[in-house]
Image (cartoon, grey):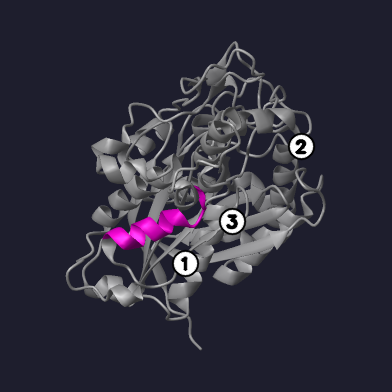
Amino acid sequence: MELKRVVVTGLGALTPIGNTKDEYWEGLISGKSGAAPITYYDTEKFKTKFACELKNFNATDFIDRKLASRMDKFTQYAMVAADEAIADAKLDLETINKLRVGVIWGAGIGGLETFQEEVLNFAKGDGTPRFNPFFIPKMIADIAPGNISIKYGFMGPNYTTVSACASSANAMFDALNSIRLGHCDVVVTGGSEAAVTIAGMGGFNAMHALSTRNESPETASRPFDATRDGFVLGEGAGALVLEEYEFAKARGAKIYAEFVGGGLSSDAYHMTAPHPEGRGVVAVMKNCLENAGLKPEDVDHINTHGTSTPLGDVAELKAISEVFGNHAKHININSTKSMTGHLLGAAGAIEAISAILAMQHGIVPPTINHTTVDENIDPELNLTLNQAQKRDIKVVMSNTFGFGGHNACVLFKKLD
């Protein structure tokens, strides 16, 4: 069976450094940090008092107030990003066969704030179970794509992938295969997360995963820097509209890139720590290249997982050196988490969007906040430090990894 070609025709982004794809891109190339003191709750007793929150965002500017009240933030974010991507793709919603349009979404946690609020409210009471009737529908991780499909009437495959921080990259790969295999003409895919909450921050602090650089939040996310001390939690959503190539061409769609392949693997090593030699990461990048029918030397740019953790950054770069050999030093490597923070289940989507826009505009966003060389990192690697770099890019890779050892990798190229 010959696989169908898949292209990207729409993008939508809601991030800590920009509330649209264009604002997001401007934030990226200008090296903008999205980290700042938390405004959602009192952080006095928390180890980490900052995060990458959305700025100047009000869900009811986009969603009917009554409907918004029945959604957790992670679903609200999903709706806004998906709306932008669908509008960007200029789909003809009157004539399209909605039975062949799917929504495949990623969320690592789902409605954490809703769960937190309902349980705390119960704990304050007399033991009588008085729960909001929308508690479960607001909380469950699959409700974001459900709401997108309800709004637009899309009746194709509809579900959420959950693989921690790899969730939206997993969703994109599933979406790719749904079109490749002929099951869909169009899939709306991506991911969303809203974990900047008491439970989210407290939980990640308890496992010593977060930076505690409270005196300088804007510089706390510092991938590849010797002084990095953990990741910075972010929130938001990213959405992509994928289409079968002939379908997109027939309707005269604008095409950002061809989605040529993906890969999956497992570390099979530890619940939260990566394998120190990046064995699972080596496997996922090799799987992705093979799936795309490309060679290591074809890749021009890699948007790394690059979370700013002591172990993870080194393991990923070791894996890149192993897979790409001498060519590794000719690749523009970056970590946009230095600016957006770590959006958990939405990370793969917003970072794939960054990679696609880097290819479209011929400029690689920087890895900001780098001041101190890490002697454990190969000095010959081009980590695109502190300043965007112009480059003609034909093939981009985006890596995303999650607690539990889940690894996902996606590849895009300029349309031939």
> Which residue lies under the disc numbered 3?
162
- Amino acid under label 2? Leu
- Does residue 145 lie above or below 274 as drawn? below
Badge 3: how crowded within 10 Å, few (<14), some, or many (20+)?
many
Badge 2: how crowded within 10 Å, few (<14), some, or many (20+)?
some
Position in image of residue 183 (x %, y %): 43, 79
Position in image of residue 15 (x %, y %): 42, 37
Give the dominant element type of the magenta stretch: helix, strand or loop. helix
> Which residue lies under the disc numbered 1?
175
| Residue drawn 52% across the image and 19% down it | 218
- Amino acid under label 1? Ala
> Which residue lies under the disc numbered 2?
311
Q: Nearer the viewer, residue 268 or 197?
A: 197
Q: Secondary structure at mark 1?
A: helix
Between marks 1 and 3 in the image, the one whose residue lies nearer the viewer: 3
Between marks 1 and 2 in the image, the one whose residue lies nearer the viewer: 1
- Residue 314: assigned label: none
Q: Nearer the viewer, residue 321 or 206?
A: 206
Q: What span is colored magenta in the figure?
A: 139-151
Mark 1 vs mark 2: which is more N-terminal?
1
Position in image of residue 83 (x %, y %): 29, 51
Mark 1 vs mark 3: which is more N-terminal?
3
- Amino acid under label 3? Val
Q: Secondary structure at mark 2?
A: helix
Q: Could one spot residue 216 in this view of the protein?
A: yes
Q: CA distance from mark 1 to mark 3?
A: 14 Å
